[in-house]
């Protein structure tokens, strides 16, 4: 019976029904209640940065080398000393368990099976030990300071013991961004309101019976299993927005974090060359040029646009990753041409997870990987290690800084 259901899910994301990430997005929209779909899909305020992240990839064009035979393409890359099959990492996506039962385990398992890394958000519904058991690939733990320093230290110890190989410290979340879709959809009322305030928003759950049945069978509203408040237990979902108000990470915090975690640290949320240099100064091993997928400060520059500035600032001292707006394998190629070592994706796989669980995540990875190979062949380039600026044209005003 289970095998049958699994087969059904795999079929639902197979070609020709699902050819690209936008198809996965539509499939997620069909399965998920609006409040969950918009949580994935939406951004902050006017969603300018959300749109700009994607649009920036359109502004960079390719310069292929034609009549070049590339029978095989080498996609392997080493990131922080671990070999990945593809220059791709699944970014931390909080509350993945709302998208699909045991969502974080499903995503980590699909990443491991594809030979790529998975970053687990602090704000996840599955225990980090269970996520480690579910994956055979490299795992990173993303740290927020919700719940305070002791809470973070205990998560760090657990992540170490469970075999996570890097710590991702997200620095762009001084407070939660203003995500208007969540407010309009009643996210607050559904999480913490009384029956009366919930009622106007409940119908969006009832009209998605498959999602609702799976959600209830998975235990209903998740708690944050890796934010264990001393004397209280796992943090309740309704408490997270208030907790984020007191959870800003500062450069000084990197000192005690460094003491507690001796393996590689990755700073996520770099928007400028200046902050990139600070990441080098505090001893980070890597950084992620990221604006949280346009979910935090609206009107910051798209990540691809500032990649050149950041790469120049760090001068090869640490590894540079990028996320934001990646929906095609050709987007990955463009980021690599401009100096990223690898990329992270958030929505591209979250849509897959929301559409069909693990098989949906696997399909997202497969789509990006197949695109990547095709793009390399069309460019006349046999290996991602050979990609550089000579394969792209960038708008002249990107080169000003
Ligand atoms: C639904 C959702 C939840 C997210 N939760 C987190 C999180 O808990 N921690 C974090 O550092 N980033 C989080 N992010 C940001 C992603 O890690 C990543 O930076 C972003 O999704 C990249 O943009 P993209 O979605 O266009 O690929 C989240 C993104 C999404 C879409």
Image (spheres, grey):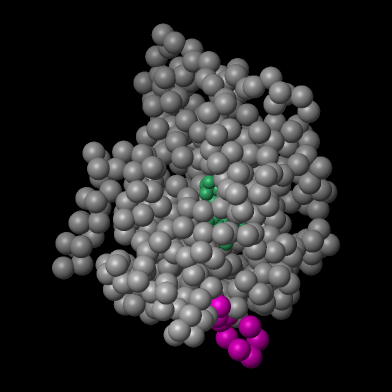
Foreground: 177 or 355?
A: 177
Residue 289: x and y, percent? 66, 44
Foreground: 258 or 269?
A: 269
Find residue 152 and report its image quarter. Answer: bottom right
State yes or no: residue 232 in magenta: yes
Residue 292: x and y, percent? 61, 52
- Compared to residue 13, the image places residue 3 above or below, namely below
The residue shown at (38%, 42%) is 22
The residue shown at (74%, 51%) is 284
Point out the stretch of residues depicted in magenta. Answer: 229-238
The quarter of the image holding the N terminus is bottom left
- Compared to residue 310, the image places residue 72 above or below, namely above
The residue shown at (48%, 12%) is 65
Find residue 213 and report its image quarter. Answer: bottom left
Residue 37 in view: yes
In this rendering, position of residue 37 left or right of residue 30: right
The residue shown at (56%, 19%) is 391
Foreground: 381 or 201?
A: 201
């Amino acid at each position: 019976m289970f095998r049958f259901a699994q087969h059904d899910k795999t079929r639902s994301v197979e070609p020709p029904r699902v050819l690209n990430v936008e198809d996965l997005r539509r499939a997620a929209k069909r399965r998920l209640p609006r409040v969950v779909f918009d949580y994935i899909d939406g951004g902050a305020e006017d969603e300018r940065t959300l749109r700009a992240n994607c649009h920036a990839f359109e502004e960079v064009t390719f310069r292929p080398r034609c009549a070049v035979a590339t029978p095989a393409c080498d996609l392997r890359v080493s990131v922080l000393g671990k070999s990945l099959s593809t220059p791709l990492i699944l970014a931390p996506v909080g509350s993945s368990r709302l998208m699909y039962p045991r969502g974080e385990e499903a995503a980590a398992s699909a990443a491991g099976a594809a030979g790529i890394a998975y970053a687990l958000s602090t704000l996840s519904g599955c225990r980090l030990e269970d996520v480690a058991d579910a994956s055979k690939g490299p795992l990173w733990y993303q740290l927020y300071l919700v719940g305070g320093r002791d809470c973070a230290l205990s998560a760090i110890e657990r992540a170490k013991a469970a075999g996570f190989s890097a710590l991702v410290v997200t620095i762009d979340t001084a407070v939660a961004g203003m995500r208007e879709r969540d407010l309009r959809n009643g996210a607050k009322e559904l999480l913490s309101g009384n029956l009366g305030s919930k009622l106007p928003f409940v119908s969006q759950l009832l009209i998605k019976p498959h999602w609702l049945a799976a959600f209830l069978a998975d235990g209903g509203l998740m708690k944050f299993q890796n934010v264990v408040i001393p004397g209280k237990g796992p943090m309740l979902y309704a408490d997270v927005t208030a907790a984020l108000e007191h959870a800003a990470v500062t450069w000084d915090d990197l000192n005690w974090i460094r003491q507690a975690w001796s393996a590689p640290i990755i700073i996520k949320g770099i928007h400028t060359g200046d902050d990139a240099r600070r990441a080098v100064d505090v001893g980070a091993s890597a950084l992620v040029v990221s604006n949280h997928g346009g979910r935090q400060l609206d009107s910051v520059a798209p990540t691809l646009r500032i990649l050149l500035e950041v790469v120049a600032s760090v001068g090869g001292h640490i590894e540079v990753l990028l996320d934001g707006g990646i929906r095609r394998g050709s987007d990955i190629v463009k980021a690599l041409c401009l100096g990223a070592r690898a990329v992270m994706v958030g929505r591209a796989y979250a849509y897959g997870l929301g559409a069909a669980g693990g098989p949906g995540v696997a399909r997202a990875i497969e789509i990006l990987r197949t695109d990547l190979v095709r793009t390399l062949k069309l460019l006349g380039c046999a290996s991602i290690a050979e990609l550089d600026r000579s394969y792209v044209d960038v708008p002249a005003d990107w080169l000003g800084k």
